[in-house]
Amino acid sequence: MGPLDALYHAVNFMAPAAALAVLLVLGGRLIRSKGALALSWRAQVAINFVVGCAVLVGGLVVLGRDGKMLTYATLVLACATCQWVLVRGWRG
């Protein structure tokens, strides 16, 4: 595998975490009221992306294979919980 192929594999591996991070933050902006936010949208996307990548790597290590549905379900739960904490969902 060449370096370009390795880059494509890495980008495709991280794509679900990136898409979910962006969709969570944008969706949260539509649903939540326009109150003061603790973090900017970029910071929220970055934190959700890092959490998502950690979950994907953890799923790869634990399950031994990429693309398992259990990993994706855990990705959704972890990122949703992280977003809830970031917007202080327990207060409202």
Image (spheres, helix red, strand yellow):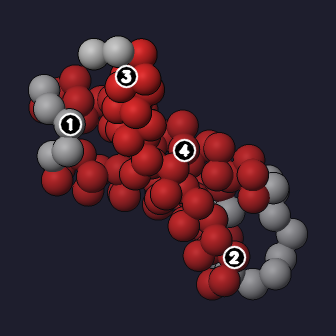
How far is the residue under mark 3 from the one under mark 2? 35 Å
Which one is in front, 47 or 12? 12
Neighbor class of circle 3 (other Cα within 10 Å; few <14, some 14-19, many 20+) is: few
SS type, badge 3: helix
Residue 59 percent coordinates (x, y): 24, 35
Neighbor class of circle 1 (other Cα within 10 Å; few <14, some 14-19, many 20+) is: some
Residue 82 shows in this picture? no
Q: Earlier in the sequence, mark 3 or mark 1?
A: 3
SS type, badge 4: helix
Q: On residue 29, which mark appears? A: 2
Tell me if 37 is positioned left or right of 61 in this view. Answer: right
Q: Earlier in the sequence, mark 4 or mark 2?
A: 2
Relative height, residue 38 to residue 54 (above, below): below
Judge depth for marks 3 and 1 and give the one in front.
3
**Kind of residue at disc 3:** Ala
Q: On residue 86, which mark appears? A: none
Which one is in front, 38 or 19? 19
Judge depth for marks 4 and 3 and give the one in front.
3
How far is the residue under mark 2 from the one under mark 1? 31 Å
Tell me if 52 is positioned left or right of 45 in this view. Answer: left
SS type, badge 2: helix
How far is the residue under mark 4 from the one under mark 3? 20 Å
Judge depth for marks 3 and 2 and give the one in front.
3
How far is the residue under mark 3 from the one under mark 1? 15 Å
Residue 64 percent coordinates (x, y): 13, 26
The residue pinned by badge 3 equals 6
Q: On residue 66, which mark appears? A: 1
Judge depth for marks 2 and 1 and give the one in front.
1
Relative height, residue 41 to residue 35 (above, below): above
The residue pinned by badge 4 equals 49
Q: Earlier in the sequence, mark 4 or mark 1?
A: 4
How far is the residue under mark 4 from the one under mark 2? 17 Å
